[in-house]
């Protein structure tokens, strides 16, 4: 029968003091209670650990062996408890986050940094994904969490609002409209508008095109042949404008800038988690909620 760890820890204090009175005082219990603990420990082990006399306490051979080996065993046990607590708190394991490219400038890096801060047992892998693929990937377990722009459809997931931001347009710094602090929707609609192809991302395509519904003349939409055009030549040349969230104000490439659209509704970014949630999922949700509050991502 294995001894209880409390009695073992008490024994180690007694092995250092070799005096029941001093050991009991150091532990903070009565001396008779300490004596009872040690007798129970000896009974569990089936051997004497101490030689007692009216004047002294000495360790037996078994007692000396236990005093030498027990600290390492208790330290290993403490580490096991800590590991279990970390796992229960969602601070241990591997977290796979899929994110849409439009959230990769500020939102996703901020959440990943906060998740990893102070939790050395948590490994985070964040990978860009096509927006419509994120919710299905969370639902079937290919990834643990997702960050998407817009409320993407999907079964088997729970979505929570992570960020609400103004929407505007990205445009060349030399574009005539860049002189304005805000741009009217009708003014922006007079230029070709660069938005994702609907076949690639129907939610975002519909959300962005709806901004200009009713504008006269009817807006012309330019959809790049690839989902993310690194060159953005049409933008840099001032040929098109690209509707974008306000994170583009601080992350625009050289030669481009961002201006808000006056009267446009806000853009939303959502955290996507599975319906059945582990401690790790619950930690992601709690950290995301705290981060959104601290960074004012959800203004009242």
Image (cartoon, grey):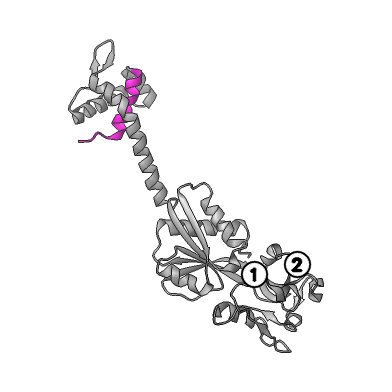
- Left or right of 211? Residue 203 is left
List x then y, in percent, for residue 108: 57, 61
User: Where 204 sits versus 78, above or below?
Assistant: below
Specify the principal SS of the magenta part: helix
SS assignment at label 2: loop
List x then y, in percent, for residue 13: 35, 24
**Can you say which quadrant of the picture contains the N terminus?**
top left
**Disc 1 from disc 2: Cα separation:** 13 Å
Q: Given the current orientation, which residue lies at the most extreme top position? A: 55
User: Where 103 sits versus 262, above or below?
Assistant: above
Q: Earlier in the sequence, mark 1 or mark 2?
A: 1
Q: Which residue in the structure is indicated by mark 2?
A: 255
User: Where 82 sits versus 228, above or below?
Assistant: above
Pick the front one: 53 or 133: 133
Give the crowd class for mark 1: few <14, some 14-19, many >=20 residues within 10 Å: few
Residue 180 lies in the magenta stretch:
no
Q: Which residue in the structure is indicated by mark 1?
A: 230
Residue 13 lies in the magenta stretch:
yes
Q: Quadrant of residue 189?
A: bottom right
């Amino acid at each position: 029968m294995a001894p209880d760890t409390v009695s073992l820890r008490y024994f180690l204090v007694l092995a250092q003091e070799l005096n029941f009175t001093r050991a009991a005082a150091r532990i903070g219990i009565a001396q008779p209670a300490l004596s009872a603990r040690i007798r129970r420990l000896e009974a569990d082990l089936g051997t004497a650990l101490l030689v007692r006399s009216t004047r002294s306490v000495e360790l037996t051979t078994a007692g000396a062996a236990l005093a030498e080996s027990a600290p390492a065993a208790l330290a290993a046990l403490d580490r096991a408890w800590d590991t279990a607590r970390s796992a229960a708190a969602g601070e241990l394991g591997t977290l796979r986050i899929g994110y849409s490219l439009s959230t990769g400038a500020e939102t996703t890096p901020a959440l990943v940094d906060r998740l990893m801060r102070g939790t050395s047992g948590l490994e985070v892998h964040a990978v860009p994904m096509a927006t419509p693929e994120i919710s299905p990937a969370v639902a079937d377990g290919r990834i643990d969490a997702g960050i998407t722009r817009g409320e993407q459809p999907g079964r088997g997931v729970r979505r929570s609002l992570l960020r609400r931001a103004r929407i505007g347009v990205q445009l060349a710094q030399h574009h005539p409209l860049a002189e304005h602090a805000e741009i009217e929707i009708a003014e922006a609609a007079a230029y070709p508008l660069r938005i994702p192809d609907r076949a690639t991302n129907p939610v975002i395509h519909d959300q962005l095109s709806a901004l200009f519904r009713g504008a006269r003349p009817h807006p012309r939409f330019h959809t790049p042949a690839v989902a993310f055009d690194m060159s953005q030549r049409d933008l840099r040349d001032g040929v098109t404008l690209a509707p974008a969230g306000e994170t583009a104000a601080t992350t625009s490439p050289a030669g481009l800038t961002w201006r808000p659209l006056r009267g446009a509704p806000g853009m939303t970014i959502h955290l996507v988690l599975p319906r059945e949630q582990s401690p790790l999922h619950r930690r992601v949700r709690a950290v995301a909620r705290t981060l959104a509050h601290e960074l004012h991502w959800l203004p009242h």
